[in-house]
Image: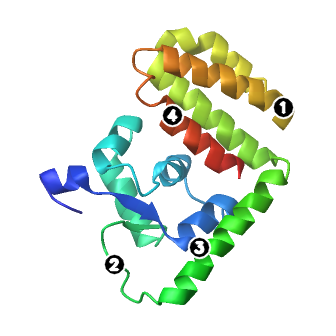
Amino acid sequence: MPCSATKLNAIYCKTATGENEIATRQHGLLSKQRQALILIDGKKSYAQLNQLLPTIELDQLIHQLLQLDLIRDANATPLLAPQNPAANHVICITESSAKATAIPLDIERLNAIKQLMIDSSKTLLGIFANTLIEKIKSIEDAAQLSPAIAQWNLSLRESKNGQLHAEQYLEAIKSLMK
């Protein structure tokens, strides 16, 4: 783990294994580990992630995800970095992600999306989220999901605490939908 100021500025990105884990759930991650993995995008610093996941022990999660080779330090160069194969691999991930968007949501991904929406609503909206949470809990398919996401995102954007994080949570939802 990086130390103090360096730690706050540390940026992590998903490895190919991490991208694959989001799509396949092969590692059986706990929900908080998965939530952290989804939010890690190679752009957000440790400090920003810590704001998005305030109730989670982020140090421990980062350490676990690093050990599982699901993420890496974005500023570190990979030990064995073949130029061409890595580029081809990224293209493969992008192509499979594009195909996955057309596939209807399975129940596991739908539940993961709902849980992320519920958790973020509780954290950022407090008691004002109760009606919204009930609506999210009643979602049964992808058709009901889109309007709920729009309402949820609007609620986050209009709230004092949520406006700073609304876009990042929306990106996390989009990556879960792939």
Q: Do the residues labelled 4 and 2 touch (CB within 8 Å)?
A: no
Separation (CA) of disc 2 from disc 1: 43 Å
- Residue drawn at x 34%, y 46% is 57
Nearest the eye: 41 or 68: 41
Query: Residue 68 got which mark?
Result: none
Question: For the residue labelled by badge 1, is the local secondary structure a helix, a strand or a loop?
Answer: loop
- Residue drawn at x 85%, y 48% is 104
Q: What residue type is labelled 3?
A: Val
Query: Residue 90 got which mark?
Result: 3
Residue 119 point in image, percent of width and height: 54, 30
**Dot 4 alpha-carbon crowd within 10 angstroms: few under 14, some 14 to 19, many 20 or more:** some
Residue 27 seen in render: no
Separation (CA) of disc 4 from disc 3: 24 Å
Separation (CA) of disc 1 from disc 3: 33 Å
Question: For the residue labelled by badge 3, is the local secondary structure a helix, a strand or a loop?
Answer: helix
Q: Do the residues labelled 2 and 1 touch (CB within 8 Å)?
A: no
Residue for badge 2 = 77
Residue 155, picture quadrant? top right
- 4 or 1: tag closer to the N-terminus: 1
Residue 29 point in image, percent of width and height: 56, 58
Residue 108 point in image, percent of width and height: 74, 48
Residue for badge 4 = 167
